Image (tube, rainbow, N blue to C red):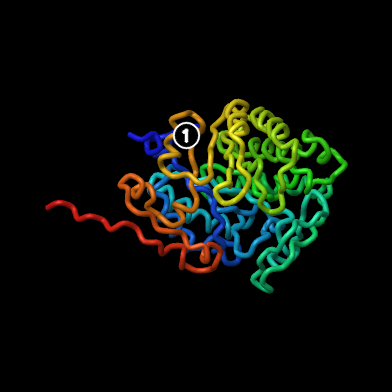
């Protein structure tokens, strides 16, 4: 039997296989509250994987940088997510929520009243962001976070993690990748601070380590993972010469917290710089918890990397977005549906819950 399709362990959890559904922003949460359409989307895909990592979900009104992304800071949001976790658990699959504070990647048009675009420093990201009200707009120049803002944000992550447990999630993944708030602290282009949270990598990593430790203290180390994207360039995060050495420091610092897993992103299949094998090997060596790899995997490469011990779990995104029954298709060699990028971020069921599944064969008489 393929290792990919055999049962796996993640801390105290037993997963049906080694395949994980990647966090995939889909922008269907009208009013920033999970809804019945989202319940159906996750329910369709749950039987294929051992673990689902939810779409990016904000711990704070300030982190709702994109239109129609969900949060997990209100009672209505917790209730909406509870329907999702119930549907996923009903078929024996585990689910973590990804806590994604967008930081400087945002626009006031996308935020609720009273919220603000915040970041380590008042440095706007290059490029534009879509708003429902006015279409594409340049990224806003964020407000540089004060020490009080930092304490508030850490508290929001903690409360969101507690809310996640109340909503039935098996754990949380902190989004420290793809140019969002946590990575904005790690990277020198977006963090120009001169206090204890800026300058050296030890200082730039302080925020993420404080968030990790606070969330672990609130819900337990067996329920906390983090996503990182060294060499990722998305959302104006250019690579820089010291990156490998600095992420080595980060790997050691995260290992010392005892958190459950690191989810390492390689988006080179979508045009980002390749994550060198030396970096993946470094994380394997320095981090003693579960290592999850993502990035353009098919079944053969996933199985190969698992067998070689390069990773403990493998995540897939676009293949399961377009193929709710992905494992069945991979096992039988059936053709895959092609994903439709024009519907990735649009409201409604089209390109979301209407991808076809394989026809069931009639049972023999």
Q: Residue at x 58, y 58 (%)?
A: 77
Where is residue 278 drawn, in percent x and y?
Answer: 61, 31
Q: Residue at x 33, y 48 (%)?
A: 328
Quarter in which the N terminus is drawn:
top left
Where is residue 211 drawn, in percent x and y?
Answer: 70, 40
Using the image, determine if residue 45 lies above or below residue 278.
below
Most extreme residue toward the right, as rendered? Answer: 194
Disc 1: which residue: 305
Q: Nearer the viewer, residue 121 or 100?
A: 121
Using the image, determine if residue 279 lies above or below residue 333.
above
Instruction: Provide the secondary structure element on which disc 1 rests.
Output: helix
Where is residue 188 drawn, in percent x and y?
Answer: 78, 43
Q: Residue at x 38, y 54 (%)?
A: 336
Q: Residue at x 69, y 56 (%)?
A: 63
Q: Nearer the viewer, residue 185 or 271?
A: 271
Instruction: From the viewer's perspective, tell me whether residue 281 is left or right of residue 302.
Output: right
Where is residue 294 drawn, in percent x and y?
Answer: 53, 43
Instruction: From the viewer's perspective, tell me whether residue 259 is left or right of residue 300.
Output: right
Count every numbered label the image shows and give the total.
Answer: 1
Residue 240: quarter of image = top right
Most extreme residue toward the bottom, as rendered? Answer: 134
Using the image, determine if residue 340 lies above or below residue 238.
below
Q: Badge 1 local density, few (<14 within 10 Å), some, or many (20+)?
A: some
């Amino acid at each position: 039997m393929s290792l990919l399709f055999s049962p796996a362990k993640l801390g105290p959890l037993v997963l049906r296989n080694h395949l994980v559904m990647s966090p995939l922003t889909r922008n269907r949460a009208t009013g920033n509250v999970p809804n019945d359409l989202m319940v159906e989307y996750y329910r369709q895909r749950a039987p294929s994987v051992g673990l689902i990592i939810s779409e990016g979900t904000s711990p704070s009104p300030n982190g709702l940088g994109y239109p129609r992304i969900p949060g997990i800071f209100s009672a209505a949001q917790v209730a909406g997510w509870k329907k999702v976790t119930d549907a996923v658990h009903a078929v024996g699959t585990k689910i973590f929520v990804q806590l994604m504070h967008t930081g400087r990647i945002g626009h006031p048009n996308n935020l609720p009243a009273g919220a603000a675009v915040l970041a380590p420093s008042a440095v706007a990201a290059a490029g534009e962001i879509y708003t429902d009200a006015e279409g594409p707009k340049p990224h806003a120049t964020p407000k540089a976070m004060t020490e009080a803002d930092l304490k508030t944000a850490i508290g929001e992550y903690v409360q969101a993690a507690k809310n996640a447990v109340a909503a039935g999630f098996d754990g949380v993944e902190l989004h420290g990748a793809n140019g969002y708030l946590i990575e904005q602290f790690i990277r020198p282009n977006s963090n120009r601070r001169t206090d204890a949270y800026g300058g050296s990598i030890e200082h730039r990593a302080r925020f993420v380590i404080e968030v990790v430790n606070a969330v672990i203290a609130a819900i337990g180390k067996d329920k906390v993972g983090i996503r990182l994207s060294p060499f990722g360039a998305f959302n104006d995060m250019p690579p820089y010469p010291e990156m490998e050495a600095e992420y080595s420091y980060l790997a050691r610092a995260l290992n010392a917290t005892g958190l459950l897993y690191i989810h390492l992103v390689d988006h080179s299949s979508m045009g980002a710089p390749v994550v060198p094998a030396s970096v993946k090997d470094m994380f394997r060596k320095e981090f003693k918890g579960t290592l999850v790899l993502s990035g353009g995997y098919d079944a053969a490469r996933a199985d190969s990397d698992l067998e070689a011990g390069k990773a403990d779990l493998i995540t897939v995104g676009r293949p399961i977005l377009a193929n709710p029954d992905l494992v069945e298709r991979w096992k039988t060699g059936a053709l895959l549906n092609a994903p439709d990028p024009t519907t990735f971020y649009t409201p409604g069921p089209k390109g979301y819950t209407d991808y076809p599944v394989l026809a069931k064969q009639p049972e023999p008489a």
